Amino acid sequence: MQSPRLDTAPKILILGAGPAGLACAMELSRKGIHSTIVERDEQIGGLAKTLTIREGDQTFLTDIGPHRFFSKNKYLYDFIEDLLHEEWRKVPRLTRQFIDGKFFDYPVNVKQVVKNLGLWKSARIGIDYFMARVAYGLFRKPMRTFEDYVVANFGRTLAEFSMINYTEKIWGIPVADIHPDWAKQRISGLNLWSVFKNAIGLGKKKGKGSPKSLVDEFYYPQFGTGRIYEEIGKHLRAEGSTIETGAEPIAVRHDGVRITEVDVRTKDGVQTVRPERVVESVPITRFLELLDPPPPEPVRAAAKALKWRAQVYLFLTLDKDSVTKDNWIYFPSKDIPFGRTSEMKNFSADMCPPGKTSLFVEFFAFETDPIWSMTKEQVLDLVLPYFESWGFFTRKDVRNCYLLKRPNVYPVYDASYAERLGVVKEWLDRLENLIYVGRPGRFKYTNQDHSLEMGIVASRMVLEGRKYDMEPIGSENEYFEKGVIYEKRL
């Protein structure tokens, strides 16, 4: 059944039905304002959607990679609890790194490192950290790259053991070419000393609603993180907003001050929409290509130089009760082709049939890499020898496998990205009825909670007719897995 034709003169046009766009529409709906939402995929939720895999009478659910929820913003907890009620559950967090055939807690567990690595290498870690603090602290060596940042905060030995190699695996470029913003955004406030204090109990605070020094639990929906967005979509449609799936913008016309028209390709053909405001969360580089007239050449050149990292995913359904107890596992070694796995059953038992489990395997890639062109059988043959040699599972345990590919997943924080992005944003900010949000829309590696917060802030910009600075969202000056685990409201 086809959805209704688009409103050709909506108050709000939202491009992209990911967390940010849907949160914006939800907040506006609560104030009686309807939105028109355009989404290229058939399913809403962006990278936070939950996929349903049916194999006969068995149903497996999987997110697109691990999605856990923790935040310092209590409004977000209440926002989701109002949608999901009893489906919104607290889950214990177990995340480890698998290095040289051994499991290491993530973040680093000092006692475990000493046990697994031995006294000499552990002492080397301590010595290197001391030397790094002298160089970067006492002598104020500048931190110009990600490499500088992690060496300054962990010492060379520990940085190379688990951070430098995994980071290069994610981005596909040397850490010496990665901007320190990546570290400041993801691990700011975390260093060897803070990890040590946490290990001996000095970094923990007790009490209801108190910040967890390193998050050891998180909230998660009973049937996958996509349930948040399914419920938002249900509410929006019931209240009169339009969500057009299988549709995408193909041209955005403007007069240099305002966006005047947007051509949208739908299942019914191309329709021209003349919105009062546009909230866009499609990749910022793609959005600039849609603009008519095009931005000036320096802006186009800056956007063209921004790079994205893609992902390839292999989802395995298994005739096995369990692989590990981890929510997700990191594989830092460059000798291992994949970077992370998630076992969805360990997020919620309802993600798999009884007695079965599944594994979601992630590869970081550029679209020119060989993995991008492989078939699912080739990718399965690539990963199986690793899992079999580690005793995780065998080929006989594999019921089926499914291959997915996503472009524009990770904005690459190379050494020059900030300058280039600044040029693009400065020009886009001249369009007074445009708000750009979310990870793709702002070229910023945000978590789910940050994207939701951006959407909520965008709604307030619409309601109040003023601009807010979104840059601080997701840029807190501390480790990104610190947060507050609020108790449910009674």
Image: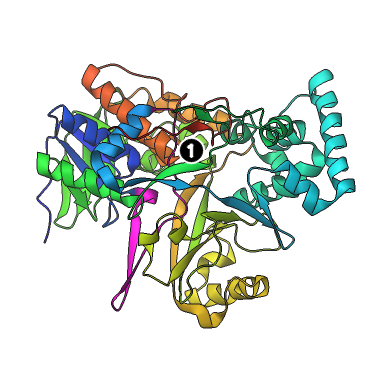
In the image: residue 165, left or right of residue 260: right
* Percent x, y of residue 248: 27, 49
* Percent x, y of residue 398: 49, 78
Badge 1 is on which residue? Answer: 303
Q: Is residue 158 above or below residue 149?
A: below
Q: Is residue 264 above or below residue 431?
A: below
Q: Is residue 195 magenta?
A: no
Q: Give the farthest residue toward the right.
A: 120
Assess disc 1: are there few (<14), some (14-19) or many (≥20) residues with their C-alpha within 10 Å of its C-alpha: many
Which residue: 24% across, 23% down? 462
* Percent x, y of residue 220: 39, 47
Q: Is residue 392 above or below residue 255?
A: below
In the image: residue 188, left or right of residue 192: left
Q: Is residue 65 magenta?
A: yes
Query: Bounds of the magenta span?
Result: 46-73
Which of these two is toward me, 250 or 343? 343
Can the viewer see residue 167 in this picture? yes
Way the structure is coloured: rainbow
- In the rendered image, which quarter is residue 102 located in? bottom right
Q: Amino acid at mark 1?
A: Ala
